[in-house]
Each structure stands twice: as C-alpha cells, then as structure tokens.
Image (cartoon, rainbow, N blue to C red):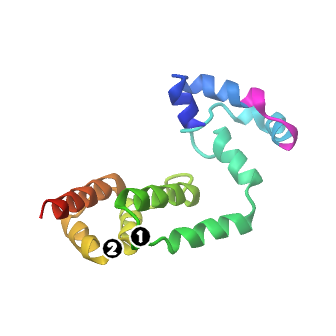
Amino acid sequence: MERVAEANNWRTAQIYTIVVAYLKGAAANYYEEKCANINVWTNGNASNNLKDLLMAQFTSNSTKNIWYSDYLNCQQGTMESVKEYSNRFKKLQKKVNLNNGTPAANTIRQFLSGLNPVIALMVYASGPENLTAAVEIVKSIKAGYKII
C-alpha cells in the first residue's frame, strides 16, 4: 500500500480514507467495531493505526511463528547478492517487528549473523548505528571487492 500511495503522491490521511473505503467482509466489520479508536493508517502507535490492528486481528499465530522462524534463519545464499539478502531480511524484519520494539543493536546482530562471515566481520568492526547503516557498509565493502 505504501508504494501505491507514494506513486500517487497520497498524503497519510488520504491513505487511511482510501483503505477504509475498500475494506470488505470481516475486515470492514472489524473496522466498524473499532473505528472510534482508529485515526491513521500507519505510523501511530499500535492501538490507533489501522495497519497494525488489521495485522494483529487477521494474522494467525502459526503464520507469525513461520515469519519469526524465517527471520531467525535468514541467511545470505551463496549466489545471492547483498541487495537481495538485505531486501529479504528487511521484509522479514518488518513482519516480526511491527512496532519497531526491537533494539537496533539486536536487528544488526541478526542481519550480520546471516551475512557472509567475511563481510559480517568487517561490518561489525565498523559499528553501524542501525540496519540502514549496516547495509550501506556492506555495499561499500562489496564495491571495494569489485575494485580489487
């Protein structure tokens, strides 16, 4: 949804209004019951943004367990580029960390644990502050290897 909103230059309030208009069935019924407490699509706290509430309501525990297992076991494949691995990791991380409650240091550790060990060691030594910084360091290291 966020990509569609960005492509159409929608404001946050517009996204909420559009999403609500397209809700059907159980999701529409759930919204009608909870609408007094919901005022944004995302970026609010988990108790007042529609995206997180819908995820919590309609995502089963078994699905969440699979996402978490995939996140914990996320490893860079031998033929997988850094970009592909980091994108896959970020997608899984968003699924298991809906409210950004995981400390950045833990996210970085998890990212590095699945990365090529030679590169992970260099990134760790660089002391990245967050996942974005860690990914940028990895890209710089990979670019450096291509020069040699």
Among numbered discs 2 and 1, the one appearing first in the sequence: 1
Which residue is denoted by mark 1 in the rendering?
76
Residue at 52%, 55% (x, y): give it.
Answer: 91
Q: Mark 2 packing: few (<14 Cα in 10 Å), some, or many (20+)? A: some
Lateral position of residue 4 relative to residue 146, left or right:
right
Magenta-colored span: 20-26
Numbered-mark total: 2
Lateral position of residue 117 relative to residue 146, left or right:
right
Residue at 87%, 39% (x, y): give it.
Answer: 25
The front one of 49 and 94 is 94
80, above or below 132, in the image = below
Amino acid, disc 1: Gln
Prevailing secondary structure class for the magenta stretch in the rendered image: helix
Q: Mark 1 packing: few (<14 Cα in 10 Å), some, or many (20+)? A: many
Residue at 30%, 77% (x, y): give it.
Answer: 117
88, above or below 79, in the image = above
6, above or below 126, in the image = above
Image marks 2 and 1: residues in contact by CB distance under 8 Å:
yes
Lateral position of residue 34 relative to residue 95, left or right:
right
In the picture, the quarter occupied by the C terminus is bottom left
Residue at 42%, 62% (x, y): give it.
Answer: 85
Residue furthest to the bottom: 117
Identify the element where label 2 is drawn.
loop
What is the CA distance from the residue labelled 2 to the residue labelled 1? 6 Å
- On the question of residue 47 being in view, the answer is no
The front one of 88 and 98 is 88
- On the question of residue 79 being in view, the answer is yes
Identify the element where label 1 is drawn.
loop
Which residue is denoted by mark 2 in the rendering?
116
